[in-house]
Amino acid sequence: MGAWGFQAFENDDALDWLVELEAGGAEVVRQGLNAVADGYINAPDGSVAVAAAEITAAAQGTPHGDLPEDVATWVTAHGAELTAEDAQLALEVVERVAGEESELAELWDEAGEPEWKEPLDNLSERLRAALT
């Protein structure tokens, strides 16, 4: 699965995607979110979508306390390009990744790791706070 932790940037898929992020602006984040907007979510796309949602939350002023330095730098440079609409999409995406049509949910559940949803719940709360 290329994962070693529950946080958004603790898996190979999200870390590989950061190379794309550094080369682009907000559209890269939107593509990461839109890749899982409907249908079954495979694990790599789900991992990227969660990372994109974390970046969106940070851009909306509700960052995770342990954001990687390169991500924080990107948010400072490009975060203003992300809108409340992007935050709403990010919230929907996080809920989908945690849901029944998600390979990540299946894999973590099979591994007997229900704690994997805690960071997603926290991210959802921060995105909701950004939208109020």
Image (cartoon, grey):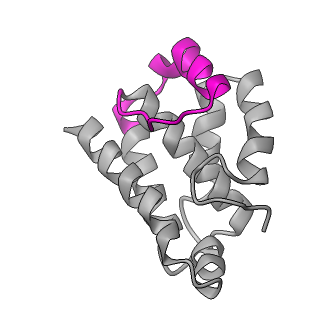
User: Where on the picture, by quarter, is residue 44?
Assistant: bottom right
Q: Is residue 9 left or right of residue 65?
A: right
Image label count = 0
Q: Does residue 50 appear in this view?
A: yes
In the image, is residue 71 part of the stretch drawn in magenta?
Answer: yes
Please state the horizontal and vertical placement of residue 64, each as a whole percent of the image.
Answer: 45, 38
Name which residue lies at 45% across and 58% down: 120
Against 29, residue 82 (above or below) is: above
| 43 horizontally vs 119: left or right | right
Instruction: Give the left or right position of residue 9, taking residue 132 as reference.
Output: right
| Residue pictured at 64% horizontal, 46% vertical | 9
Q: Where on the picture, by quarter, is residue 118?
A: bottom left
Q: Which residues are magenta?
A: 61-85
Compared with residue 43, is residue 94 higher up or lower down, i.e. above or below?
A: above
Q: Please, is residue 28 above or below residue 93 in the view?
A: above
State whether the magenta stretch is mostly helix, strand or loop: helix
Q: Nearer the viewer, residue 7 or 85?
A: 7
* 81 or 121, nearer to the observer: 121
* The N terminus - image quarter: bottom right
Q: Is residue 106 left or right of residue 53?
A: right
Q: Position of residue 30 (x, y in %)?
A: 57, 39
Where is residue 95? Give x, y as percent.
Answer: 42, 64
